[in-house]
Image: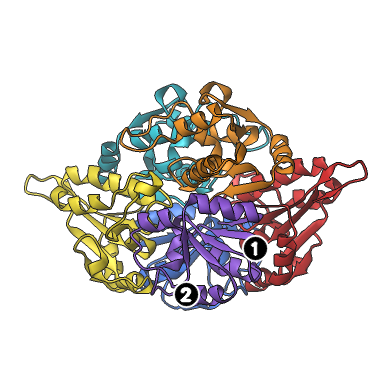
Chain colours: A purple, B red, C orange, D cyan, E blue, F yellow
């Protein structure tokens, strides 16, 4: 199951909550304001690094660039919308917002 | 995804309620969606997570707001054969709530159990 | 694969409408069938033909209309539309108003239903 | 006192429109002057005359129109309206479209500007 | 200055943030989903009790009743919309959402 | 509230940006409001709190989203005589950001200092 998260982790509890429900190995995709979650050196770094130990983590590169995010946490994979489609081909989608 | 006795597709569809009632319309319009979908003989469930559990609180009286209330509609879900109502244990606890504070009988599960149910679904719709 | 899209927010105010469009475009480019975009909650505002967004910005209303022309069903929920002033006489071309039963049919028929909200 | 209200969310989807109305009603009841309700962001959707909300629920569009009839200016921002399909030919009675300069005048003139958003 | 807060403290960071900016003695009014902040026995009880030591705290009774909240934290004052207007008469308004 | 040399009322109006750019339109339409208000000779300021600080990040490139960017407009505020830009220190720190990551010169203040400025205002508008 693909989990997508589009909320800023500072503004909204979607990241904090969804992590309780995401099973190991399931891909997690950050988009829109959700991509602030994977900016390096913010207070959510440890949360994302813990998630990365069990789950592949993706972020939409267009959203990263639009927000001026230069450094993302190591091992977070940047993909475009076609990469998003590929993930949807392989998984049902659980859209957290 | 399974087939029923007539060979029709039966999909597992879970609706996720995560928003408080009244402050926004999401839970209310979500419930309208559940009611319509319930007529299509699919395998429907609802999970209540985060502020979604507030939608089930007893004794909601919206008259003072002049807003149409809908908590009682959750009691009617039974009659629509929507019987799988899951409530996230942590969400209840954080809010100082107990199952007896809720207007309907629900199954209180831990997050991992709801996560497993989510993964079994053909469709998950967050409302 | 057959894809259905459920869009729950209005144009411009939330990025959901942009993400849904970019996703649909990428799926079509990769040869998938995007059956329909179902508009719910404030999402119904995406098909108003009264809008005139700034010239120097993208036109979301035209985008949906063009997707509709390409065979993607662009559908606004009737109950949600009535609450927000969307009616048959203000719809962009190649879009229509329908009931939640249609969304249920879509959910049953497609391989993947992808939601965009906020 | 002279009150101005700034409403930043659309009808039904967010309670802000209800709160703004209840506040305006209470202020009028207490003898204050509610000069204007300025609609911004999705707030502009509050004045669509195409809406038909359910019979068994409150009608927010009528409420604004009636407040307008009572002398409260009901104003929708033109730039925000254009992005969301609100135009002169779909406005409820006793409402109008204007620019942000008007909001500035209101902010300068009133004793209190009260915002309702989400 | 009157501070109003209309967001659920669980969903959104508005309560957490606004508290940093609210000066002592300034009234704080919870409305809409913000009223869950003053429901007794939830995880924000201590935050509200701390706030009550320095600031008067109000909640709109109609919002409390609409949400089925039976017990509110001690010393939180329930008011109606006319009470809200009275507060606005005395203070400029800072609307947090 | 003061009067200028012509006896006109000059109000202190603070705009508060608390939302990230692009995910929602609030900061962008908020900025449009600031630009119009700046023509009215009022005492305008903007404070950036929480995700509002993200609006000021350098090198935002929205071309891939096909969305109109507006970060550069903050640089132009100077020309509109909007020079009081306050940034909340805690908000920057939580996000791992430094003043030099921002596209404009701002005054970084602690929350209590911004709180005091808020209290001096005639009008505070959260965008």
Chain ID of residue with mark 2: E
Residue A73: image location, x then y, percent: 43, 71
E8 left or right of F47 in image: right
Q: Residue at x 51, y 35 (%)?
A: C45
Residue C25: image location, x then y, percent: 50, 40
B24 left or right of B105 in image: left
Q: Nearer the viewer, residue B70 or B51?
A: B51
Residue pointed to by mark 1: E69
Q: Nearer the viewer, residue C16 or E80?
A: C16
Q: Residue at x 54, y 35 (%)?
A: C84
Residue F105: image location, x then y, percent: 19, 63
Is residue C86 in view? no
Q: Residue furthest front?
A: C31
Which mark identifies residue E52?
2
Q: Nearer the viewer, residue E41 or F47?
A: F47
The span from disc 1 to disc 2 (Cα, nearest Å) is 19 Å
Q: Quick one: label 2, few (<14), some, or many (20+) residues within 10 Å?
A: many
Chain ID of residue with mark 1: E
Q: Residue at x 44, y 50 (%)?
A: D117
Is residue F67 in view? yes
Q: Residue at x 71, y 61 (%)?
A: B119
């Amino acid at each position: 199951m693909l989990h997508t998260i589009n909320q800023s982790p500072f503004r909204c509890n979607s990241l904090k909550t969804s992590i309780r429900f995401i099973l190991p190995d399931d891909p997690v995709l950050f988009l829109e304001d959700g991509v602030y979650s994977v900016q390096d050196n913010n207070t959510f770094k440890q949360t994302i690094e813990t998630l990365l130990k069990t789950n592949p983590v993706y972020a939409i590169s267009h959203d990263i660039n639009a927000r001026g995010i230069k450094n993302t946490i190591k091992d977070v994979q940047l993909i475009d919308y076609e990469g998003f489609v590929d993930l949807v081909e392989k998984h049902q989608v659980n859209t957290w917002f | 995804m399974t087939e029923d006795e007539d060979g029709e597709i039966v999909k597992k569809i879970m609706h996720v309620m995560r928003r408080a009632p009244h402050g926004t319309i999401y839970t209310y319009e979500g419930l309208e969606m559940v009611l319509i979908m319930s007529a299509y003989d699919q395998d429907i469930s609802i999970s209540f997570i985060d502020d979604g559990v507030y939608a089930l609180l007893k004794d909601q009286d919206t008259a003072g707001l002049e807003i149409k209330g809908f908590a009682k509609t959750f009691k009617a879900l039974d009659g629509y054969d929507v019987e799988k109502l899951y409530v996230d244990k942590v969400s209840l606890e954080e809010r100082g709530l107990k199952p007896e504070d809720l207007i309907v009988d629900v199954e209180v599960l831990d997050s991992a159990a709801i996560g497993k149910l989510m993964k079994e679904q053909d469709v998950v719709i967050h409302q | 694969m057959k894809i259905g899209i459920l869009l729950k927010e209005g144009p411009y105010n939330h990025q959901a409408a942009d993400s849904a469009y970019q996703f649909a475009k990428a799926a079509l480019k990769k040869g998938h069938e995007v059956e329909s975009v179902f508009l719910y909650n404030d999402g119904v505002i995406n098909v108003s033909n009264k809008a005139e967004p700034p010239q120097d910005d993208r036109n979301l209303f035209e985008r949906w209309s063009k997707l509709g022309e390409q065979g993607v069903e662009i559908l606004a929920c009737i109950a949600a539309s009535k609450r927000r002033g969307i009616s048959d006489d203000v719809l962009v071309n190649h879009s229509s108003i329908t009931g939640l039963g249609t969304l249920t049919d879509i959910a049953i028929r497609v391989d993947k239903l992808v939601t965009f909200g906020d």
